[in-house]
Image: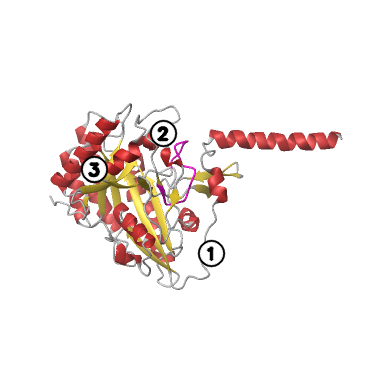
Amino acid sequence: MIFLFLFILGITTVLAAGAILIHKKDMHTWIVGFCRRKKPVLNDVSGPVHVMFCFVDHYEPQWKNKDNIELERQRVDRWMQDYPKMASQFTDADGCHPKHSFFFPEEEYRHEHLAKLSDLCARDFGEIEIHLHHENDTSDNLRRTLSTFAQTLHQEHGALAIDPKTNQPVYAFIHGNWALDNSHPQGHWCGVNDELIVLRETGCYADFTFPSPDATQPSMPNTLYYAKDDPNKPKSYDKGIEMKVGGSPYGDMLILQGPLGFNKELSKFGVLPKIERADIRATCPPTAGRVDNWVNTHIHVAGRPEWIFIKIHTHGAQDIDMDCLLGTPVEQMHQHLTTKYNDGEQYKLHYVSAREMYNITKAAEAGMQGDPNEYRDYILPKPTFKRM
């Protein structure tokens, strides 16, 4: 009997320790959805698997700096000089270089920075979208902020796509501190419970915030889905309806996520794997093993498993990470992508911007097949981008 008691006590202790660890790492918001999700079987797919690779950036030149314009300029100028050198070394199946999607924060806007970024994007090295940090905000103020910034980006820089139906600028969005729809557990960094509605009504075509490193993460990881806002509650995006071939838009916002899971290359004490959140930085470089894991996560529109979407993110204006993002580590990542995942037989690689990723997911939803390169501008055309 004593052995049974000790066995039960041991099992109980392990389970309790596991529950504590799960909550400590904020895994409780997504681990059930992660375990339930089934990856597709590709036995019936003919031809290559197409890998759409999208790199989004919380691009903040004022990071830990509010008063030094010269430091901001140095950060932006390094990207203007080094990114084309790095990206020009690599091409995908369509002849495109890597495309960096700069999500620029409204509260850090300076004309000179956006003029430089627009010039870089006019040379097909990326596109510009909207990022925002705010606290204790209101629906009315948020609406004014987003509408004004969208018009500024369009009129001053030609930096946003124009919706052919409304003839108005539209944008993709990343929320500062991942607190979309007032989702922070303590209510920080937002304040607007109807944020999804405000985003939709001001021209946001998709949200690219997730995965996140905390409890703001939705319970549907590794899924492309639609969310409907409850204007009286926070975190309305927590659950929704998955995108699928033959489906139709639902609710207020399309949520396009990157891979979330476990990094088998990194572990604590050689046992517990680190959490994989598709974040690229000097302390978490984009190794070949991570690339393989992103592909194997197999994010796709339901019913179109041969089109895989990988969305990774970074904070590109942080000085400590620039050597990783513009130097050898990211070059090795692209080398792996363009060799293993662009052989033309088993895989074809497509470097896409956030807008192009959206367009291709919508083409899949509409039942389009074949080469996704044909659908980069399926709904939203490329912005005009003003040159310097």
Figure check: 108 above or below 41: above
Identify the amino acid type marked 2: Pro
Question: Which residue appears at 21% of the width and 42% of the height?
Answer: 150
**Residue, disc 2:** 234
Q: Which mark is residue 12?
A: none
User: In front: mark 3 or mark 1?
Assistant: 1
Q: Nearer the viewer, residue 375 or 125?
A: 375
- Which element carries disc 1, helix, strand or loop? loop
Residue bounds of the magenta highlight: 212-226
> Is 19 situated left or right of 4 in this image?
left
Cα–Cα span, label 3 and label 2: 35 Å
Q: Nearer the viewer, residue 62 or 321?
A: 62
**Residue, disc 3:** 76
- Which element carries disc 2, helix, strand or loop? loop
Determine contact: label 3, label 1, CB under 8 Å: no
Q: Magenta region's main secondary structure?
A: loop
Q: Is residue 59 visible?
A: no
Magenta highlight on residue 220: yes
* Residue 212 in the image, given as x and y percentages of width and height: 43, 41
Q: Is residue 215 visible?
A: yes
